[in-house]
Structures are given as C-alpha cells and as structure tokens.
Image (tube, coloured by chain):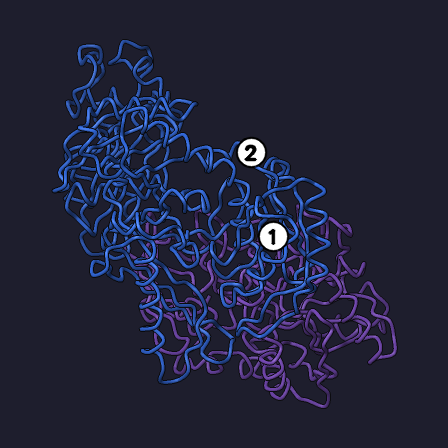
Chain colours: A blue, B purple
Amino acid sequence: MRIGIDVGGTNTDAALLGDDDRVLAAAKSPTTPDITSGVTAAIRALDPPVESITAVMIGTTHFLNALIEGARLAPVAAVRLGLPATAALPPMTDWPERQRAAVGGHGYLCHGGREFDGRVLSPLDPDELKRTAADIAARGIRSVAVSSVFSPVAEDDERRAAEILRGELGDHVHFSLSHELGRIGLLARENATIINAALRDLATVIVESFGKALAEVSITAPFFLSQNDGTLMDVDFARTYPVATFASGPTNSMRGAAFLSGLGDCAVVDVGGTTADVGILAGGFPREAAGESEAAGIRTNFRIPDVLSLGIGGGSLVSDDGETGPRSVGYRLTEEALVFGGTTLTATDLAVAAGQADVGDAARVAHLDPAFVTRALGRIAERLAESVDRMRTSAAPLPVVAVGGGSILVPEALPGFDDVRRPGNFGVANAVGAAIAQVGGEVDRVFHVPEGRRDAVLAEARDEAVGRAEDAGARPGTVRVVDIEEVPLAYLPGGATRIRVKAVGDLDLNRIGSKQHTQRHGATAHA
Amino acid sequence: MDAGVLADFARGCAVLGSGGGGSPAAVTRPLAEQAIEECGPVPVVAAGELPEDAFVMPVGLIGSPAVAEERIGSRAEPARMRERVEALHGRPVAAVLCSEIGGLNGCTAVAWAARLGLPLLDADAMGRAFPRMDQNVLELAGLRPGPTVLADEYGRTVVLDHVDGPWLEELARAAVATFGGHAATSEYPLTAGQAARHAVAGSVTRAVAVGRGEGPPALLTGKVASVRRDVGDATRVLLEGTGTDAGRLVRIEARSEFVAALEDGRTLALVPDVIALVDVHSGWAVPVEEVRYGLRVRLHALPSAPVWYSEAGLRLAGPTAFGLHGLTREGAS
C-alpha cells in the first residue's frame, strides 16, 4: 500500500492506494504552518494500516512559496564561469528586489566556459577561483551556485570549479551546478541554480519534518517527493535539488486525473477554491510549456506543465451581473458561502442551487432566481470551454476530466466538449497523482548529428535516458521512453541539434534501498 | 530612450522582426536595460540633425540566437569595436546605427549606444528583420559593405574588405562559424548624410509606436488551427478567425520570417511587408519557431520601407528571394 500526499497552500490532501492501485481511502485537512501537523492529521484521517505501507509520496509547494515570500532563503554565492563573454549582465540582474535581497545578491564573474561544440571558450583560472573562495568564506556563505557557458554541452568546467572551490571552502558548503538543472539559455539556467542553492538549507529542514511527521504516525516506509515532471525523487535527491519540486502541484493533479479517469490523452480542468487550472495530458503526462517560465518573477527554464489558470473556483464571488471571480473567499468557503450559513454568494452556491452538487444546506439558496443561476453557471461553462479550446493541440474531439474540490462547477458537458467526466475521488486527484508517480530519467542537451548518423545519435540519447531512470531507482525492464524532441539549432554548423529524451519506469523500492546514494551524478535532475 | 521607452521599443522590435530576427526578450532587452541603468538613457536623433560628414557606426549581432543566449556579451565589446572602426576610418564615431531593427538586434544597438555614450540614430538599415546581411537598404543604395568588422567578446577581430553584398554574407557566415556561431558586426559604415538619404528613417520611433499598439488594425483575430513544418525552413500556419472574424481562414507562409498571408487565394500581405502574429494574451509577437496550435493571435501586416517595393528591392528581398513563385501583390494590403 502507498500513501500519496499533496501539501497545498490551503489544504493537505491524502490518498491511500492498494497494491492493485485502487484508491482505498481519501482525506483532506487544512495545511498548517509547522509542516508536520497538517501531514500527520491527513494521514491519521486515512487511518492506514501503517505496517502495510511500502512508500509515501509527497508533493509540496513549500519551496515555491519560500521563494515567492523571499523567506527562509539561504545566502548564495553565484559563481559564473564565462569571462569575458558574459560580463555585460551579471548574475541576478533582473531579479525582483525582494528575492535578490533574500539571497544576498553575491555574484562572481570568473573565467571558464565552452563553445556550443565543446571547444574551450576561456580556460579556468584556479587562482581566480581561490580568490573567489576566500571572499565567499569571508562572507560566511555556505551555498554556492556554479554556472558556466554552454555547460549543458560540456559540464567539466562546472565540476572542476566546484572541486577547486570545495577544496578551499570545505565539505560543509553546498554546491549547485547549473548543468544538472537547466537547458541552453545561460541566464535562465543560472537563475534556477541560484534558487536551488538558496533552498538547500530549507530542503534539509523540510525533508526532516516530513520524516518526523511519518514517524509520529509510526510509518517507517521510505518517502519520496514529487518533481515538476510527475516523477519521484528520493530524500537524498530532494535535499540536493529542491527546485525540482516547483511545479509538482499541477503535475500531480493532472496525472491523478489521468489515472482516476483511465484516460491518457485528455484535457484536465482542476478547479480549486480560487482558480481553475486547465492543462492537456498526452500519453499520461502533462504537456509542458514551451520557452521560458517564471517563478516569483524570476526567469527560469524549468520544464513545467503548460497550464492556463483562470479566476474561477468554488469560493469565487458571483457578482450581480452573473459574472464569477476572480475574487474568492478562498479557505473561508465553509463560513462565508450561503449554503454554509454565510452571507456571500459564491460559485459553490450556484452549483448547489442548480442541483449540480450536494454540499451545505440547499434550502439557503432556494431563493436564488433560477434564470440567474443558469446564466451564471452558463458563463462559467463558456469560459472553461474557451480555455480548454485554447489549450488543445488539435481539432480532434477531446475528452475533458474535471478534478479538484471545486469541480462541482463543471457541468456534464461544456460548449464544444460533449465528453466531460468527473471520476471518483476527484477531490484528491493531486494526492493520487503523487501516489502513482514513477521514476524518470532525462537527457536534454546539444548533440552533434553528422549526416547519416541521426538514428545512432538518437539511440545513444535514448539509452542514456533509460540508464538515468534506472540509476534513479526505476525497475529495469519497466522503463520506457515517453518523449523525444529534436530541435535543430538555426545558423549553426555541424548539425547541432538539441535532443531531449525522457524515460520513466516503475519505482523499485529494492533498488532505492541498495544504491548507496552514489547516484547524484547523472540521476534525473531535470526540472 | 530610457527603461520605460525601452519596454515598448522591445515589443515593437519583436513585431518588426516579422517572426524572425531572434527574440529580444531573452537577452538583448535585459542587456539594454542594464546598459541604460549603468550608463544612462540614450539620446535618439534623426540622422539629419548631425553634420553631413559625421561618421556613423552600424552595429548588430549575427549568428545563432541559441549561442547569443549563452554568450550574452561582454562589457568591453562596444568600445573595442569602436576603436577598431575608428582606426580603419581614421575618424571618430559620432553615432550608432542599428543594422536590423526587427528581432533582437534593435535592443543590441540601444545597449551599445548606452555603453559608448553615443546617440542612436532614429533609423536602421532594414526597417525589419531579414535573414541575410546584404538584404538591407544600404546595399540597395549602392553603399559598400566594407570594411566590415566582425568581433567576438575577446576582441578577436576579422575585417572584410573589398567585398560586395553576397561576398559579405558568404565570408561573414564562415567567420561566424569559427567564432562559435555568434559575433558582433559593423557593416556598411557610413556618414550621417548617407544615413539621412539612404537608411530607413524613423525606425526607432516606429518600433516604440508599434510596441505601444499604434498602427493599422489587425487583419484578423483568431487562433492557430494548424502548424506544418516541412523539411528545410518552410513552415505553414493556418489561422482560424474567432469572434467577429469567425468563419475566416488565413494561411501564413513562413521561412525564417513570415513571408505571406493568404485568404481565399487573395494575398493579404506579402514579403517585404512585415507580417506579425501577436499573442493576444502576452502582447508579444510570436517568433516563427514558437507558433503552435491553439495560440490566440492577432494578425498584423505593416508596410516596409518604400525602397523595398522597388524593382531592385523586390529582387533582393521580395517573394522570389524567399522561393515564393507565382504569388503576386494583387489585392495585397
């Protein structure tokens, strides 16, 4: 048996899954500031047979929230290898002031880096790095982010620089290396690396807290954290790459929706208290956003699900003209909504008045004008349908799966979408998504593809991705390639092509236990 | 040009890129912003405001936008380029001219002008983006490309002299490959008088206005209904009208830029027209390689500089230069 947990901003959701993957129990409880008590409360509500639990999978928004708040971040030394080629824009230049101040804004420009084809751009200068280390030590900084020009093509400089710095600074200092976190695009990759470095101390605390929470309810099984791409990382990995959890919330919801509905290709509408998130599943995995993404106003290039959010949720306020949102009563829904004895007309009240849902006291909304209710719900349906239509990737018919506590707002059919489903346990799809997560491996870098060698290069990349999934704890034989992307780079000679291969397989608990934590090198690090 | 104007300018440059020229958002806009913050706003002047014989240095980046996103530029490049150019010509540079306003290079010129403390001419050499270095109005005016200076961040420099436009393109691409796919360039050096007579006047002002959403109304508001990428660089996009445009279908042909917009066999816009798909949600023009199904866009077409519609202009950068045979401007906007 496994437990999936999703720690959201408002609620902590939990689901208990049997070995046959059936959902045996589900629970919701309020998220608490102290991390542990919300998790223990949710698990206790499941009332699981603790001795039969083999693994616990946790999705959390803690790290993203810490960045947004600019709180609990550690000071970081951002060392960039690329002089003189990158001096025009020092590290953290376009960060919001709050976040820059929170990490200290310490940037160091040093020599190093490669060309797109791996040639040396400028040689590393060990003396320069030693001087840099002295300054880092003098400032008492204990987390270092190293980024280097074209490190996704050639990572050696980042590794060597980290070795030299570690030699000076000692083993108690953490290193985050950019080639393990991002793709081509120095500034966005460097930003992701700095954010990761700033979260390292917090990661240790949070991982410990989760461990404590499980111990409190007498669960001794290993636990894992959800990554952006819907795959798992073990505790050791989570401490090293906390930034890889950033978008796990929407990913888990969508993966859970796929699992609960039995559909691998569909649109998912995840309606919470304040927003509805619309995404597209292809082959059971969320379609990822193209281009750059932002986290707390900082440009990064994490792979995150392509999600369109609109301000419609169960707690959304309904105005006199029948429009819903974006303002919401949020977590105070159970006090303020009419059906719960409050005085605020919310979207949930509309759903109850129309007979779409049975929550609270229906008598309290009996006075609403049926024509008004129909019109307001019709507008919600229209706006949801328009968003799904915007997200779809072809004109072919597409089933829509509605999940989340607020999905009672979604009618049985949307304009243009006849097939709308709300699977059982729709309210805890995110926790289910965490529980069913697999283990992944990814390759994403520039390959040189000489004429006639395309198949061989692709095979090499596939093998590497499969190997990484196995290194990360996937059971050999269950690993399959779920995505291949090939983008030839414009205006470059030599068939330079960015190739990305993603492989996933089933979690093999025996392998996790036996791999002695030596896998950091090359395990699935991509966000 | 201060940071506020720069934001509009960058959006406008993306539109004038006609889907090509690289995206200013990733690197060159932040570079220009940083340069303005460090060195102050950039005076933008009409070429006619300078003495006839004042010397003007054109600037731009060529090569792969992917490499530009890694090698984001050094502080010393602009000054070194100026030194080299001044040494070749034996006189001081009085102003900077943007080689290509469309795409990422508009902001490059702003960043360099700021770092050099020089005015930026309210003009450019293309009025938009084109894939080849010799597809510019100074070539049409009969100016010589040489001496052209190409340099990397280390000051490694190649000077091309006694070349015509096609040779410039050939030799510059070969040098850029050796430079690792990216270099700064200054080609078609000229005087303020020549710039006033031959460059595309008002480009910087125009980009700012376009970035603020001024200009003719959209030809169509709709969504991308299909994207087909063929072998080579040909891409075909189908737009489906929505709202008041429901029922309309527009086909867009693209190479490295959008080059034609067609409806019911009618030509709505044809290169050298600027053709832009503007994302209705972000307000940014979408590059050819980022167009995908479902994107909600406004289709805009803007005229290019008049000289592009002359016989010589069309020969250099008209439909046939992009392999579009049999398409006419019949009915074009």
Task: Say whether disc 1 or disc 2 marks the residue closer to the N-terminus.
Answer: 2
Where does residue B268 sit, x and y in percent of width and height?
41, 66
Disc 2 target residue: A70
The residue depicted at 55 percent of the width and 31 percent of the height is: A71
Q: Is residue A421 above or below residue B82?
A: above
Disc 1 is placed on an element classified as helix
Disc 1 target residue: A166
- Local crowd at mark 1 within 10 Å, few (<14), some, or many (≥20)? some
Q: Is residue B36 above or below residue A385?
A: below
Q: Is residue B140 left or right of residue A244?
A: right
Where does residue B328 sit, x and y in percent of width and height?
42, 77
Quarter of the rendering containing residue A454 = bottom left
Q: Label 1 sits on what residue type?
A: Arg
Where does residue A380 sit, x and y in percent of width and height?
28, 33
**Residue B240 vs residue A433, the one in the foreground:** A433
**Residue B131 vs residue A287, the one in the foreground:** A287
Disc 2 is placed on an element classified as loop
Q: Is residue A356 left or right of residue B325?
A: left
The residue depicted at 58 percent of the width and 64 percent of the height is: A157
**Residue A69 vs residue B202, the one in the foreground:** A69
Where does residue B12 sit, x and y in percent of width and height?
58, 56
Q: Label 2 sits on what residue type?
A: Gly
The subunit carrying tag 1 is A
Q: CA distance from mark 1 to mark 2?
A: 27 Å
